[in-house]
Amino acid sequence: MTAKTYELRTFGCQMNVHDSERMAGLLEDAGYVRAPEGADGADVVVFNTCAVRENADNRLYGNLGQLAPRKAARPGMQIAVGGCLAQKDRDTIVKKAPWVDVVFGTHNVGKLPVLLERARVRREAQVEIAESLEAFPSTLPTRRESAYAAWVSVSVGCNNTCTFCIVPQLRGKEKDRRTGDILAEIEALVSEGVIEITLLGQNVNAYGSDIGDREAFGKLLRACGEIEGLERVRFTSPHPRDFTDDVIAAMAETPNVMPQLHMPLQSGSSKVLKDMRRSYRQERFLKIIENVRVAMPQAAISTDIIVGFPGETEEDFQETLHVVREARFAQAFTFQYSKRPGTPAAEMDGQIPKAVVQERYERLVALQEEISWAENRAQVGRTLEVLVAEGEGRKDEATRRLSGRAADNRLVHFARPEEPVRPGDMVSVEVTYAAPHHLLAEGPALAVRRTRAGDAWEARTAAPAPSGVMLGLPTVGAPAAQPAAQGDGCRAC
């Protein structure tokens, strides 16, 4: 009997990407196999949705509409919708798209195979939305795409009440994993060849709030430093409110914690931050950046910024530009504000006209582009050790180059060494050229270090291709820094 195939379509933040790894693992544990690329459809199509954009539902229903005729022509095909939009809209999805077979939420990912089977047997849609977490996602089977880098969730949910964000309503209150469970998962990954992990949480550095230990996250970073064979540790995304001096010290004093920080700003105006219900002000944010730079002078710092929040004046926007100039971010993920249905900000007075938001946005992007380029030019002449990646350089074949991430997460393209190099191996190169969003090393490699991670990649690719989920997942550590541009705005904040 031929195994049923599946396809996973993932939208949104890193947490959704990680959840999709779990969905893929569950499906494969139940006997499904991934549909080959280019195949004419799959037996099961699963949407893992995001709800933070104003047009998220239109995007979903557009995709579902395209699948309706395919399903009608393919007896037995099933469609499932999970994630944040499913948690929010629930029965509405089946009313608008009655050809959907399963709707499940953020708290009961583990029920996916059972719900698919139940829908098949009963021949009717199954809608099951749990109100609280049934099982911590990390206890579920997982199909990871990368042999050398992995996400490790430290918590789920969020206790913040930002007025632009619906995530706490959909993901629930913060729930922390036991430290021992986190470290055990990391040790297991390292034993399989992983050399880089990214600690993941909606508000990752609030880890420990369940037990009242404000220094728990710093202790976790230091504990990661004791794991033999773990070469790189990253984390995303922290919140300025919980970013304490002990975390900065742990980063600076733990050799395998990388000199890279993603610190969401959202706005440089203290008035707008108050309206956003962010529990810090401009001075506090800039002090954190200063302290990080004192402890780690070479650290690359990135951020998130929202332009055009309700009530933002030109003076408020100038405050944001001021912080950008002072902080000198290596990269910024910049977003034009759009109403998130169900959030307080969507009902606020002072909604900014689209033309005004667009003009401010373009000024911000231009400033950040200038700063990113200058910060990257300062890297020219430096020797960097690059973790070779798979899929980071779209032009690598044409240019005879390889690509990967430096310790500070900058993207580096470099000349292909004469000796064989595998994803997961380390290559030392000298930077010869800088663009705003990548570095280039045009000379010969200074050194090539074959790693256990490269061995793991080689073993995986030599075996018959395992089924899995195509996530568009960055294959080295934290999500790759992208040019400042308008996007989904769906990031842990």
Image (cartoon, grey):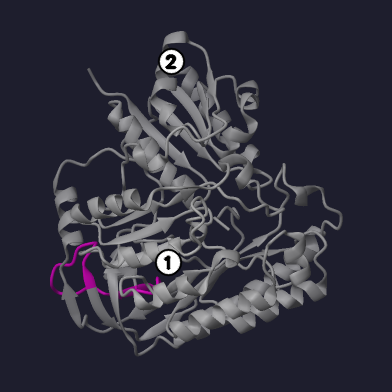
Left or right: residue 252 compared with residue 96: left
Neighbor class of circle 1 (other Cα within 10 Å; few <14, some 14-19, many 20+) is many
Give the x, y percent position of residue 18: 42, 47
Give the x, y percent position of residue 388: 27, 67
Give the x, y percent position of residue 147: 25, 53
Marks 2/1: CA–CA distance: 45 Å
Residue in the foreground of this view, choosing between 25 and 180: 180
Quadrant showing the N terminus? top left
Left or right: residue 382 compared with residue 100: left
Q: Residue at x 46, y 18 (%)?
A: 73
Residue in the foreground of this view, choosing between 127 and 246: 246
Residue behind mark 2: 118
Q: Which residues are magenta?
A: 406-426
Q: Dot 2: what SS?
A: helix
Query: Could you say which disc has been placed on residue 47 in the image?
Result: none
Q: Dot 1: what SS?
A: helix
Residue behind mark 1: 218
Numbered disc in front, either 2 or 1: 1
Neighbor class of circle 2 (other Cα within 10 Å; few <14, some 14-19, many 20+) is some
Left or right: residue 306 compared with residue 292: right
Give the x, y percent position of residue 477: 36, 61
The kind of secondary structure the magenta stretch mainly shows is loop
Q: Is residue 4 above or below residue 361?
A: above
Which residue is situated farthest in the right direction here?
349
Q: Amino acid at mark 1?
A: Gly
Which residue is situated farthest in the front direction here?
212
Q: In this view of the protein, can residue 89 be seen by the observer?
A: yes
Q: Is residue 13 above or below residue 9?
A: below
